[in-house]
Image (cartoon, grey):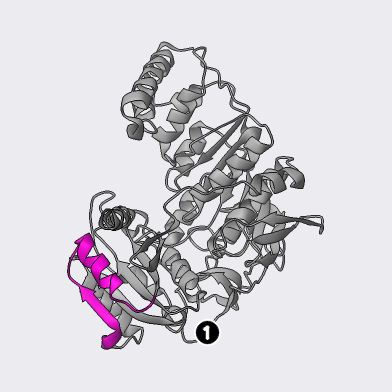
Amino acid sequence: MSVRFGVALLTGKFCAAFAGKFFPKRGTNLPGEIALKFDPLFLRHVKGTDPAKTIFITGTNGKSTTNNLILHVFAAAGLSVASNAEGANLKAGAATVLLKNTAASGRFTKDWLILEVDERSLAGIQKDLKAGTICVTNIQKDQVQRNGDPDYIYQKIRAAIDDSVTVIANNEEPHTRALAVGAADAEGMGIAGHAGSTEDVKFAGRESTGRAVTFGVAVNKHASTVEVDFGVSMPCPVCGDALLFEHRNLANVGFFHCPACDFASADTADYTVIGTDFEGGRFRLRTPDGREAGPFRLAYTAAHFLYNYALCCAVCMEAGIGSDILTQAFASFINIGGRLESFAHKGKDITYIRIKQENPETLQSALDTIAADKRNKIFVLGPAVVDDFVPHYTNTFYAFDCDFGPMLSSGTERCICFGTTISFDVANRLRYAGVPDDRIQILDTDEEEAILTEIAKSEAEVVYLITWIKKYEKLRACSVEKMD
């Protein structure tokens, strides 16, 4: 053990213990940041991690839910696992996980290492901490001031993959599917290998023998037949021409093909969710050998959760975990909070759906969830300033990549747009979607009591709320105070 690594390890462990006791919210990143200050190659110097038992989960949407679902199954199987269940998915977060699970001798103490990894950080982490399996949920529009275009993120993820890596990829999301079949390089080389799944991966003018496994979801009752007059912009990641979707299970996720170059989703993924029963909360799984497993409990029936379950099944079965353990684990899984929650206020049933404000796919998924509820309802939308990092910004551009039509025609009586930042811009987006002015209420305020008062005036008892999570928490707390 080098002196630098030893100092980094002991200092980081002390910081982790101190932060865990006095500053728990900083305890997922700060110890790793300090360790990396002392030893920038800290991840590389930890002994005993096994690439064959190291799994990274990356992508735009669904990382946290999938990571926690996989951890739940591994725990049910009695496996020894270290992970960043709290979601600290940058390099410092990975270093913190290692600090907490490495002995003073510098040796990793668990058998498995499963990490949620930020897509921009993946290549840097993979360089120092080798994962034998990289799972990609999807590659979609998100945080444009940081990520730019999805093609840029595709290149970032692809740079982390070599011939030693097994890629577990979403069959029905075009960019992720391109990773599985070995699609174009940055200059547009064309397809390097298309036709099925579990195939060799090829990259950037050189072939790789890395294995690819795909996961997907069969067409179900929540799938939509694509209308010709609306579609989220999605060029083919291989040739740049327009992709055509036969069905969408989610925004930009479904069965697709490119008429120009024949790039397409496979008819069947290696691991495919089938026979989804949303009302009964059950699904089955088709495995690579064509057999069916399940039924399994589907605890959360929003359509996007199906892909989380599909990827989880693929990871766990590839690791040798049987369907009996999956059945046991899925029966008791509880997702992290803040994604889909509800509370009552003056006779109203208010359901909060959390989205990434810079992300059209999560907004579309929320709109689809609302559209599936045919009861009379009101829709409350309150975007805020995005201040995760500089530059802070406000806009509604992501909402123009979404189809509001099905939600508006599903029994939505009124729309409330609130907030001092962009409530008028949000109202304009609804006008473009065809909502008449008399069905739009603009609240140029951030006051929780004023927002709840307006919601209480509605005749509809069902309310769907989309806003940032801190505002949701304040609204809920204000409602409880008023009831008390």
Q: Position of residue 70 (x, y in %)?
A: 60, 44
* Image position of 456 (left or right of 138): left
Q: Quadrant of residue 164?
A: top right
Using the image as rendered, state which of residue 212 and residue 203 is in the foreground: 212
Residue type of the residue flagged with mark 1: Glu
Label 1: state its secondary structure: loop
Of residues 380 and 258, which is closer to you in this image?
380
- Residue found 59% across the figure and 70% down from its top: 254
Q: Which residue is mark 1?
A: 227
* Residue 459 belongs to magenta span: yes
Q: Position of residue 17 (x, y in %)?
A: 39, 21
Q: Residues within 10 Å of mark 1 (few under 14, many from 20)?
A: few
Give the magenta range: 438-460
Q: Does the magenta portion include 84? A: no
Query: What's the residue at 61%, 63% (across, down)?
Result: 191
**Does residue 269 appear in the picture of this structure?**
no
Q: Is residue 10 visible?
A: yes
User: Is 413 left, or right, of 173 in this rendering?
Assistant: left
Of residues 481 and 81, which is closer to you in this image?
Answer: 481
Residue drawn 71% across and 68% down? 267
**Quadrant in which residue 134 is drawn:** top right
Asked whether 222 or 50 is in front, the reply is: 222
Q: Position of residue 453 (x, y in %)?
A: 24, 68
